[in-house]
Amino acid sequence: MCGIVGYIGTQQAAPLLLEGLSRLEHRGYDSAGVAVVGPTGVRVAKRAGRVRDLQEELPKRFAGKAGIGHTRWATHGPATDANAHPHTDGKGDVAVVHNGIIDNANALRADLADAGVDLVSDTDTEVLAHLIALSDADTLEGKVSETLQRIDGTYGLAVLHADFPDRIVVARNGSPLIIGVGEKEMHVASDLAALVRYTTTVAHLEDGEIATITATGFTTYRADLTHAPRTATEVDVDPASYDVHGSDFMLREMLDQPAAAERVLRGRLDERFGTAHLGGLNMDARETRAIRRVKILGCGSAYYVGQMGASLIEELARIPADAEAASEFRYRDPVIEPDTLYVAVSQSGETIDTLLAVQEVRRKGGRVVGLVNVVGSAIAREVDGGIYLHAGPEVAVASTKALTTMFLGFALLALQLGRVRDLSIADGKRMVAGLQALPGQVADVLALSEELVEVAEQLAAAESLFFVGRVRGFPVAREGAQKFKEITYRHAEAYQTSELKHGPLALISPKVPTVAVVPHDELTDRNVAALHEISARGGPLVVVTHPDVDLGGITCRRVDVPRSERELDPILLTLPLQLLAFHAATHLGLDVDKPRNLAKSVTVE
Ligand code: F6R
């Protein structure tokens, strides 16, 4: 989604801003723009389309050693040149880039229109530029602070002003803003990816803060401009891992899963005591034993993996656990219980719904831990403790390797909770061995890729599909349907196999294939009976199953995956569903890495 960059120092800003924007492209965007401030005031170049289009059309003389840039993902108004950021006051005094949503934008637009201001875009951001320009405050910080007092909503923003060419003023409320400290130069970005190439010494602005950035340093303030001292620290990231240029990300990320699985497990398994060690949880044995319930919060695929995680926790730790869509959680005014452990799960660590759910829990005194991939991200910093997933940067919109590491993160958590409680050492050792074998088994399933091309092409021909599973298999089916719909644009619906008879069976026909998840478990026979019902109605079947499952001679395309420990089976059953979606979308000639209408990080509600 929208991205912000900024630069102030001794070099020309524009090339650095464009480079920074190109490093945010993978997040999803539909327009881009930059502004610089120099001796002749503020200059802006922006347009709908790609960063490289903007680069090609940049005016020759676009000089200035301070500047801001933005990639926009349309929320208020379509992707047009006028709606692209930066937005200005129309006089060339002020330029603003903004991530987030101003909730009272309509009222402010009406006030400005009444005051004779000519608004030229459909956006909420434009009002910020005008309010800053109209402020009587003597300093740019004062103008920004005064403006922010008039707005409701979320923002990460950066402001240039012709009268204050020696600074960029930034502010944050609910949308990330990072300051990068260089040698006689400073950077700003909404995502580490845009600045790690230049510096790994960073300061994260907190909600409600404003900062002044000059070529030689930065000063942070609270909203009322009292000082809120903040120091920059070194982030432990490998800049090379942020080199996200290229294509075929989903494919590469799927193939990275065996290595990602090894990374998340590394140093965390204890063979001797059959347990896991997750120091970052910041919970001692007494606190762990006091947990009566676990509530997992995530969005989209992270929510579905959260459902897999809830099963793992119930099975291994015997603690009641469930997962809930973080996007709904806080709107039902949830009861927060002191003996519940809340677990936020997120690849990006930026998903606004998950972040706001975490804040809701904390506001009400609950304890939240995180399973997060991006180091230093907003959710990682907001939680009381957690597990980093070490999946490495994930660029394709459709999440694959991050989900595998989330599943394994839950397995580690469940194992640690279980061993502090009632899980026997024998079962603990069984799980440790199962987890150690998993990276190799993941590689074995991925090796099926070529065999799945033909069946994926057949599935791609259908307008509508079902994905079905039961109990442990149901979140697998949900995740399979999610992957399929997001990159093939086919209608893919997940159902509990047991629920088919209660309605959806009416839709089964030779034109509606079903992808069924049928592990070897206590429900195999019932699952197979449901497959017969689908087959009897002419429904084509793809069955993802285990080699020792007897499908009773049913006509289907069978995909066998190796068995793991039964608690760990869901992740191996998920992998063929990723491959089916990938091959189907590739066959349809679609942009697998950047599906339409979707952004990698969903940073607005
Ligand atoms: C699906 C997908 C999304 C994300 C969801 C949460 O492939 O990627 O459904 O899982 O937007 O994102 P994170 O994990 O960054 O919070």
Image (cartoon, grey):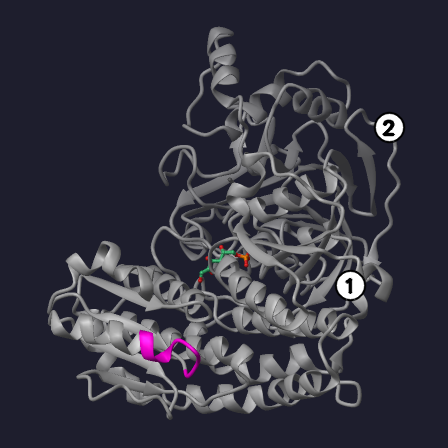
- First along the sequence among labels 1 and 2: 2
Horizontal side of residue 58 vs 226, given as left or right: left
Q: Quadrant of residue 270?
A: bottom right
Cα separation between marks 1 and 2: 34 Å
Q: Quadrant of residue 42?
A: top right
Q: Residues within 10 Å of mark 1 (few under 14, many from 20)?
A: some
Q: Nearer the viewer, residue 66 or 232?
A: 232
Q: Secondary structure at mark 1?
A: helix
CB of mark 1 near ligand 1 (< 8 Å): no
Q: Nearer the viewer, residue 44 or 555?
A: 555
The answer to whether the residue labelled 1 contacts the one labelled 2, judged by CB atoms less than 8 Å apart, is: no
| Visible residue check, residue 390 | no
Vertical placement of residue 65 versus 102, above or below:
below
Q: Which residues are magenta?
A: 520-526
How far across and how far down the image is residue 402, in percent? 55, 69
Q: Residues within 10 Å of mark 2 (few under 14, many from 20)?
A: few
The numbered mark at residue 226 is 2
The numbered mark at residue 281 is 1
How far across and how far down the image is residue 139, in percent? 77, 23
Q: How many marks?
A: 2
Q: Nearer the viewer, residue 495 or 17?
A: 495
- Amino acid under disc 2: Thr
Write the residue at 69% across / 75% down. Answer: 415
The numbered mark at residue 503 is none
Residue 82: say if magenta: no
How far across and how far down the image is residue 127, in percent? 53, 23
Q: Secondary structure at mark 2?
A: loop
Residue 522: say if magenta: yes
